[in-house]
Image: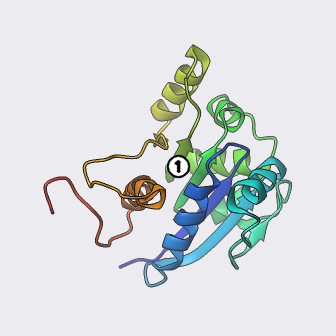
């Protein structure tokens, strides 16, 4: 099995619990992951502090929002998967329209042009027509939109268990193999 290079980006949308649980879960897949990196926007940091009670960021390589020398800012150093979780509508809109004004949007541009996996996890609700059109544009370009909408058929008994239903779906879409809840597989 080939080990993956996975990049996680946290942008300025509510939903830090998703990012925190995603990164914690990814760290449990070390046998399937060659490299794991993190980008976090300034607003993403502020929201992380507020929503997680200032939980420390994970001990993985952290890249600055304007570090265009990062290996994944070029097609020759592309990662296999970029997960933007949570993904703000501003970031989603810039990606949909090819605006590479920071490392998150540049990495997304590279992942799309290299035909690798781009997974965006928006948490916004309700959605306006611009949001929907931007999501359509990203989907047509090869990206995957995974709304941070928990499922309930696994009967989650806590917020964390509900969040895990979204995180497990992201892990599955990333191509990581592991035991996850599946419909009809109790």
In percent of width and height, residue 100 lies at 76, 40
Q: Is residue 85 left or right of residue 55?
A: left
Front one among 110 and 20: 20
**Residue depicted at x 73% and y 57%:** 48
Side of 177 relative to 147 (left or right): left
Quadrant for residue 64, please give it. Answer: bottom right
**Which residue is drawn at the image coordinates 43% and 78% (left, top)?**
32
**Residue at the bottom extreme?**
31
Asked whether 117 or 129 is in front, the reply is: 129
Which residue sits at x=56%, y=15%?
A: 129
Asked if residue 79 shows in the view, the reply is no
Can you give x and y, in whole percent of width and height, for residue 119 in the image? Answer: 51, 48
Q: Is residue 69 above or below residue 149?
A: below
101 w.r.t. 70: above or below: above
Q: In this view of the protein, which residue sits in the foreground, 31 or 127?
A: 127
The residue that mark 1 highlights is 118
Colour scheme in use: rainbow
| Residue 152, position as x, y percentages in the image | 31, 47
**Quarter of the image that includes the N terminus:** bottom left
Using residue 177 as the reference point, say whether residue 98 is left or right of it.
Answer: right
Question: In the orientation shown, which residue stands out farthest toward the front?
Answer: 157
Left or right: where 40 falls relative to 156: right
Secondary element type, mark 1 = strand
Q: So how many labels did they put on this image? A: 1
The residue lying at 44 percent from left, 55 percent from top is: 170
Give the class, few, some or many, for how many residues have Cα within 10 Å of label 1's Cα (few <14, many ≥20): many
Q: Quadrant of the C terminus?
A: bottom left
On the question of residue 161 being in view, the answer is: yes
Q: Position of residue 117 (x, y in %)?
A: 49, 52
């Amino acid at each position: 099995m080939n080990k993956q290079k996975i990049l996680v980006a946290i942008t300025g949308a509510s939903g830090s619990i998703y990012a925190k649980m995603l990164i914690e879960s990814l760290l449990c897949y070390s046998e399937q992951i060659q490299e794991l990196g993190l980008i976090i926007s300034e607003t993403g940091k502020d929201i992380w502090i507020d929503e997680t009670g200032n939980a420390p960021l994970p001990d993985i390589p952290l890249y600055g929002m304007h570090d265009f020398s990062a290996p994944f800012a070029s097609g020759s150093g592309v990662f296999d998967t970029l997960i933007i979780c949570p993904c703000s509508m501003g970031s989603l809109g810039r990606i949909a329209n090819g605006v590479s004004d920071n490392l998150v949007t540049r990495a997304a541009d590279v992942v799309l042009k290299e035909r690798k996996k781009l997974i965006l996890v928006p948490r916004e609700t309700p959605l306006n027509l611009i949001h929907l059109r931007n999501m359509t544009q990203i989907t047509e370009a090869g990206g995957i939109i995974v709304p941070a909408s928990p499922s309930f058929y696994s009967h989650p008994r806590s917020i964390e268990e509900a969040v895990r239903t979204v995180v497990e779906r992201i892990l599955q879409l990333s191509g990581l193999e592991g035991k996850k809840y599946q419909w009809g597989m109790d």
